[in-house]
Image (tube, coloured by chain):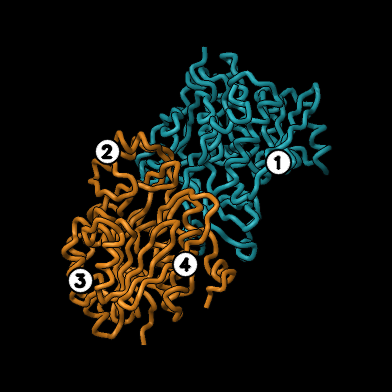
Chain colours: A cyan, B orange
Amino acid sequence: MPTLDILALGNAIVDILSQTDEGFLRDQRLAKGTMALIDEARAEALYGLTGPATVVSGGSAANTAVGAAMLGARTGFVGKVRDDELGRLFAHDLKAVGVAFDTPAAAEGPATARSFVLVTPDGERTMNTYLGACTGLCPSDVAEDAAASASIVYVEGYLWDAPAAKEAIRRAVAAAHGAGNKVALTLSDPFCVDRYRDEFRTLLRDGSLDILFANAHELISLYQAASLEEALAGLREERALGVVTRSAEGALVVSREGTEAVPAFPVERVVDTTGAGDLFAAGFLAGLARGFDGRSCARLGGLAAAEVITHIGARPQQDLMALARREGLAG
Amino acid sequence: MPTLDILALGNAIVDILSQTDEGFLRDQRLAKGTMALIDEARAEALYGLTGPATVVSGGSAANTAVGAAMLGARTGFVGKVRDDELGRLFAHDLKAVGVAFDTPAAAEGPATARSFVLVTPDGERTMNTYLGACTGLCPSDVAEDAAASASIVYVEGYLWDAPAAKEAIRRAVAAAHGAGNKVALTLSDPFCVDRYRDEFRTLLRDGSLDILFANAHELISLYQAASLEEALAGLREERALGVVTRSAEGALVVSREGTEAVPAFPVERVVDTTGAGDLFAAGFLAGLARGFDGRSCARLGGLAAAEVITHIGARPQQDLMALARREGLAG
């Protein structure tokens, strides 16, 4: 019997969030709402230009792991930090909510990864990520028995940017399926899909994936479709369950049997959308761990996403379980 | 003519904020609403027990400097960090809002100071501070010409906990008064007042202070009074202008001529009171720099304090100048 509900694999990143305006994004040629990879020199230069910061642990799959753990799922995370101040912060913030995290920190090499997250007045976030220590994740960091012992292995598309991680992912997928468990992937970002489209589509076709998370932009990019409708038609052909988020318009749960639209939870004021997709996945996966149907999983995902966009940072600040109880979604 | 409106002297601290409950404070024997000094071992132990964190630059006088700069005052800060990750964060966050900060970072010795700020559901904060590099602040770090060139030198009471700082403060006071400028002190914390009561009262009596900031608890402690009324009677005898904050009840501006009560700005939901007093002082001092009367200074202080308690962290997240304009307090 699996000892974990969810094992999340991803880049271990600390977010450095600051507020900015549209003009700054234009001047710096930053594509709003997306994630760009930057080197250390660019990271230094960009940091010097940005406003006062709030530092909160981040990383897409790590955010998902935290949300799932807060919603009662037994959760683990695999990702690489350096043994520095930000690395200790990252590890602390996982363990503080009960996420199992045993990947050894690198004792040398680049510093713990950081993402400069620029938040515009509309709450949209634009990310610039220096991968640092993440590039040192290697296959041995993913214990195969850990992967085999989780009901769902959840992988972020961003991981493909860390080349050594691919073999680690391949092993985790094999171990999970070997033990009869499921594998989920989030597409992460439309530009990320652009970089690894063929690999992601191969994973869908060859049966490596059981669940696919994507937002509308990512799905359109995956199928190089002209519209979301066209992309959804492609998704319906896959064997995997598709979960498509559409911000305030709610989510779609897509399978060969049909498509179910699930509304979003209303939010009074969107402060910072960082982590919205990650927390949606957290709620969905925590719902699966409780045996919920697709609709209830998507409701729980929407609830967690709604919490995280009301404040700065991609980690929940309210008691997600209490929110779930209030909505009758605590199982 | 002074080149700065305000030069703030204080401990250079990064806040590590996490949410907790009353039971944790009881178990750890922490006095709610106050600041306790801890050593490195206790810092490590406490960190291991606390929840997920948000990291934001802090330090009482530094928070005040940031708020004053955001409100248009020409502001500088003096305080000691180590040349480490948190020290760079601290320096970045000052410079990002235009606060002049030239104190050289220590190249060796203890790490940049951090305060573990525990926020209870009522929004109250309880602080545990490891002073680290702050203890290395020395008289030579306070350039006497800098102190002489600011209309107001603002000093936090917490600085008395860093013994080498006292001589630095003495010099700054002498330089300020020698140049015909003013000196302000904030009492910081009732326990801090308890540690240095005689010194603070001597400063008031010997003419070292022109302005005193205190909340009700600190003022009662200063005069070892039985009530706020009794403490205010003591304050009215001093030559310094007294500015007394009383949370939601607003502030009192106290001089030999009389006492003026100024209401607080209403706040929908108090999330985290960290920095409320600091930002009040920021608005008050920025008002003085604009030539406002006591009432308008206190209004601007109340406005800045109201912003900072609506979110986690002691640094403003909204455009304070825009808020001041809306209230007709931009001068």
Q: Do labels 3 and 1 share a chain?
A: no
Marks 4,1: beta carbons within 8 A: no
Which amino acid type is shown beneath numbered disc 3? Leu
Q: Are marks 2 and 1 on the same chain?
A: no
The chain to which mark 2 is attached is B
Q: How far apart are marks 3 and 2 (CA)?
A: 33 Å
Secondary structure at numbered mark 1: helix
Q: Are marks 3 and 2 on the same chain?
A: yes
Viewer-side residue, A5 vs B106: A5
Q: How far apart are marks 4 and 3 (CA)?
A: 32 Å
The chain to which mark 3 is attached is B
The chain to which mark 4 is attached is B
- The residue depicted at 59 percent of the width and 38 percent of the height is A278
Q: How far apart are marks 4 and 1 (CA)?
A: 36 Å
Can residue A164 be seen at all in this image of the molecule? no
Residue at label 3? B203
> In the visual, does A15 lie left or right of A106?
right
Which amino acid type is shown beneath numbered disc 2? Arg
- The residue depicted at 38 percent of the width and 67 percent of the height is B252
> Which quadrant would residue B13 be assigned to in this image?
bottom left
Q: Distance between the residues labelled 3 and 1?
A: 64 Å
Residue at label 4? B97
Which amino acid type is shown beneath numbered disc 1? Glu
Camera-side mark, 2 or 1: 2
Viewer-side residue, B312 vs B218: B218
Residue at label 1? A218
Residue at label 2? B29
Secondary structure at numbered mark 4: loop
Marks 2,1: beta carbons within 8 A: no
Position in image of residue A156 (x %, y %): 59, 35
